[in-house]
Image: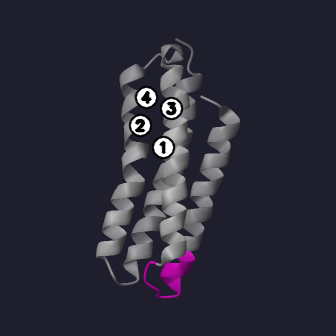
Amino acid sequence: MNGAYSGWLIGAALLLALVAVVTTVRDRPMGPVLLAGLGLLEIAVLVQAGFALAGIGHVAEKATFVGYLAGTVVIPPAAVWWGRAERTRWGPGVIAVAAFTVAVMTGRLLQIWDMVP
């Protein structure tokens, strides 16, 4: 797993979370900017998953690593589904929580990756 790419992914997820929090505070429903951000985040997470699975032999705790990796892949589509269903200000709130969760889980993936087998 590439530390620089993961750092970029964490930064992008936190930026998306910040935009979603601002949208929530402004009492606006989810719009195309948040949907596009989640789409880009999902693509970035899938690329990271490809890198990670290519070098999974390096990981000591494979089951934990794969669980976190699967979780990060599932979260953005779930946030789109839930955010579109919630037409109030809390739709972007769901997206903020999801983006923050992806950032934290990506950080945890890096910690697991760096553990010596």
Q: Tell me where residue 45 appears, x and y as whole percent.
A: 51, 44
The residue furthest right is 4
In this view, 94 is above or below 108: below
Is label 1 in a helix, a strand or a loop? helix
Q: Is residue 39 left or right of residue 87?
A: right
Q: Tell me where residue 2 appears, x and y as whole percent.
A: 65, 31
Residue 24 shown in magenta: yes
Residue topped by disc 1: 105
Q: In which quadrant of the rendered view does residue 1 lie?
A: top right
Dot label at residue 63: none
Dot label at residue 65: 4
The earlier-in-sequence mark between 4 and 1 is 4
Mark 4 to mark 1 CA distance (whole Å): 10 Å
Is label 3 in a helix, a strand or a loop? helix
Dot label at residue 50: 3
User: Tag 3: residue type?
Assistant: Gly
User: Tag 2: residue type?
Assistant: Tyr
- What residue is at 43 percent from the left and 28 percent from the top? 65
